[in-house]
Image (cartoon, rainbow, N blue to C red):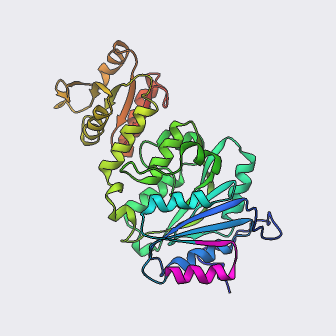
Amino acid sequence: MLICNLVFTGTTISSLSTKSIYLDPAISFVLPVHNAEKTLGQAIQSILCQRYTSFEVIAVDDGSTDATPAILRTYSARDPRIRPVFCQKNGLIETLNKGLSLSKGTFVARMDADDICHPDRIGIQLQFMMRNPEISVLGTQIRCFPLPDVGEGFRIYESWINALLSPGDIGREIFIESPLVHPTAFIRKSALDEVGGYEDNGWAEDYDLWLRLYTNHKQFAKIPRILFSWREGRDRLTRTDSRYSVENFLKAKAHYLKLGPLKKSPNVIIWGAGQIGRRISKHLLREGVTLNTFVDIDPKKIGRSRRGAPIVSPDELPSVWRAAGRPLVLAAVPSRGARELIRNHLNRLGLKEGEHFICVA
């Protein structure tokens, strides 16, 4: 018997389908799995408890050596919507692309083997996408669990990511941090096909996909409800895989800044001559971007230079910006409070976010 309450209670949605559709599912869950015997059953149960039932589950096992294959076979025997695929160890990116290649749905719903979906997740996401054809990627708000394992950093991230709902919110913050929890994503298959699925560029595969979609003018949104429980733990890839390091995130940001906002004019002013500004400037130079000027409030830095570019005060920015031909300004500071102060200052100067300046971190 399925356990459908799991960690969610209360909310319901009227079913969008009265029976399961096996041959032509509207939605394909893509579920990569590797040695997940402890959590896989709960994750699958949360999928099978979806009130919208026209879906398939492409569960791609990436060479598991525990009981994961047996668990997948057991669930597949019970429900033909679960389609397990057993592979040798290829890594996450190949596993995800294998799942995409086998998917039949118009929409792809991501899921991980240690997380839990609300029973109304895909029904609500499908309704939203049908009503908003301009949106390519749709997430949900999340709750991190179990609470004893959720540190201060993840609580801050949870609060930040749950506040980004509209295409404008997400586009404004996309070069600060990944603005969407990957397994909450509900994506038009056509958009994934257009950008070629997942790529291995040396940094986080989900952030790479978001930035590729963004630079291809795809829009993101998020359901303003907690429809997903995201498991925190010491074995999470973000803790153990170097692709998720701060340095590799900065490489990704520099790469897609050059391909997107800096494509027509690879010339930049960086507000912030501290650690983030120094590090992002290094990667921008490697991408062929010209560093025009740094801006900083520290009197010890003003008048000096960094990577061959002069450091000026905020008061000098308007004249420097106009003289340089109005290049893009990157607000490169790690502190949210400092970032808001810079945003306000640039807005007062008449610069528009997304057009004249972008925040990075």
Q: Is residue 172 above or below residue 356?
A: below
Locate residue 282 relative to residue 15 in the image: left or right. left
Whether 271 is among the magenta residues is no
Point out residue 256 in the picture as x, y percentages from the top left corner: 42, 38
Quarter residue 51 falls in: bottom right
Name the residue nearer the viewer: 111 or 227: 111
Point out residue 268 in the picture as x, y percentages from the top left corner: 35, 26
Point out residue 230 in the picture as x, y percentages from the top left corner: 50, 67
Q: Quadrant of the N terminus?
A: bottom right
User: Residue at the front extreme?
Assistant: 88
Whether 81 is among the magenta residues is yes
Name the residue nearer the viewer: 273 or 41: 41
Tell me which residue sits at (64%, 78%) in the image. 76
Q: Main secondary structure of the magenta part?
A: helix
Locate residue 303 relative to residue 165 in the image: left or right. left
User: Residue at the right extreme?
Assistant: 18
Locate residue 232 relative to residue 216 in the image: left or right. left
Whether residue 220 is visible: no
Q: Is residue 301 above or below residue 133?
A: above
Tell me which residue sits at (40%, 29%) in the image. 345
Whether residue 35 is visible: yes
User: Residue at the top extreme?
Assistant: 323
Q: Quadrant of the C terminus?
A: top left
Tell me which residue sits at (49%, 31%) in the image. 354
Q: Is residue 34 above or below residue 67?
A: above
Magenta residues, start to end: 68-84
Point out residue 307 in the picture as x, y percentages from the top left corner: 20, 30
Name the residue nearer the viewer: 84 or 268: 84
Tell me which residue sits at (69%, 72%) in the image. 81
